[in-house]
Image (cartoon, rainbow, N blue to C red):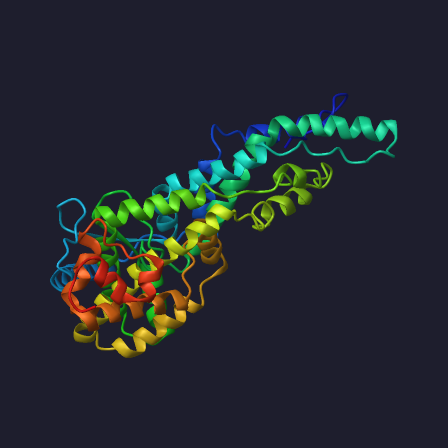
Amino acid sequence: MSSPFPAEGGNPFELLFSQLGQMFRSSGPVNWDLARQFSQWSAAEGTDLGNVEPLERIRLEELVKVADLHVADVTGLPTSSTGRVVTVRPVTRADWAVQTLEAWKPLLGALAGSLNQAAAEGSAPQAPGGPGAGADEEDLAGGLEGMLRPLMPGLQAAFLGLQFGSMLGSMAQRALGQYDLPIPRPPGDELLVVAQNVTAFAADWSLSADDVRLWVCLSEVTHHAVLARPSVRSRLEELLTAYVSGFDPSAASLEDRLADVDPSDPSSLERVLGDPAALLGEIQSDEQRRLLPQLASLLAVIEGYVDHVVDEVGRRLIGSHGPLTEALRRRRVERGQGERMVERLLGVELRQEQYDRGTSFIRGVVERAGREALSQLWTLPHALPTPSEVEAPGLWLERISLPGN
């Protein structure tokens, strides 16, 4: 194998950065190819997971039909977003990561654009050495800065590609279905279920695999029915897009951090690019803080409603409903680092208090106006509750002119 450096003459650092430039070349704010490859690799933890077992596939296909019928009956909502039949697609962790990356690309792209725009408005990185540096040191620093600057867009795109891929790969190792985070996906009626994670969860908690499969199907179909409603989808997408577009990184972002790269030490570049907090830090803007209560309230109501429907159906159909519900509650509390990072980035942090808040709202509506009133949440364009109405269901009932307040 030939050396990457010239045998005689030339600047080895110049050649090194030229090769890095080719590696990190990207036509946009995110290196999507790198994100895709890294998401697959981190989801599979460097191994090939193979295909889903045919028997698991058949069982999930049977159970999603059962779930679809019962969810439609309890909610009164169409479960399909296209008018077709809802189906399930059992996938591997790597498949889930790639499909989710593609589905979330608009949001992740808006996030990357926000970060890169703010970084571009910052000041140029200061050359190492400072005022007291000698002429030779200043020349070397200036030369390194000159070689780094053309690489910055590609390096930033590569950084975000690695970061997004790593986070989605980490999520894929625990995700049960496509709505572990309630984020709308492109229109379609094929639901993703990570078969390996479903069976692993059942085994870890000594639960019936079929009970867990049915619960996942019920949860996915209910989420799908709610998020397909035009008023819900448009409002949630509006809030999510506004949130991810609102980050306000300081000028000291990736460019400043690259000043710490030692060209003679490859591990220094890895340290800069491998730290999730290296670029993000504490960069939430005032506008995002204003949006969060609205986003949190809508997500709480969605999750509270899904839990209500799944519990109502699950009590009748799932033999281990009690132990399964407790295991799932524990699972929510024990979210992984990748999940928490994605939640913070997208503004969808779901902690147990959020689920409890949504449950209290749904219970309050049912106690005052009956289960039929819940359908108004998703069918009336103006009916999505405000943050104050989530705390006081009677206010919501009064505003939409339903009895029982």
| Extreme residue toward the top, this view | 9
Nearer the observer, 213 or 333 = 333
Viewer can see residue 173? yes
Percent x, y for residue 95? 35, 48
Which residue is located at x 31 percent, y 67 percent?
A: 392
Q: Nearer the viewer, residue 371 or 62?
A: 371
- Using the rendered image of the protein, determine whether residue 43 is visible from the camera's viewpoint: no
- Against 345, residue 404 (above or below) is below
Q: Where's residue 43, x and y in %? A: 43, 52
Instruction: Name the image quarter holding the N terminus.
Output: top right
Quadrant location of residue 131?
A: top right
Q: In this view, does 1 lie to the left or right of 307?
A: right
Residue at 16%, 75% in the rendered image = 316
The picture quadrant where one finds residue 67 is bottom left
| Front residue of this view, candidates 178 and 278 | 278
- How many marks can you see? 0
Q: Relative to 102, is 96 above or below?
A: below
Image coordinates of residue 327 in percent, x first then y, are: 36, 73
**Quadrant of image for the C terminus:** bottom left
Say which residue appears at 24% left-offset and 43% top-offset: 187
Which residue is depicted at the point 52% across and 49% down? Answer: 284
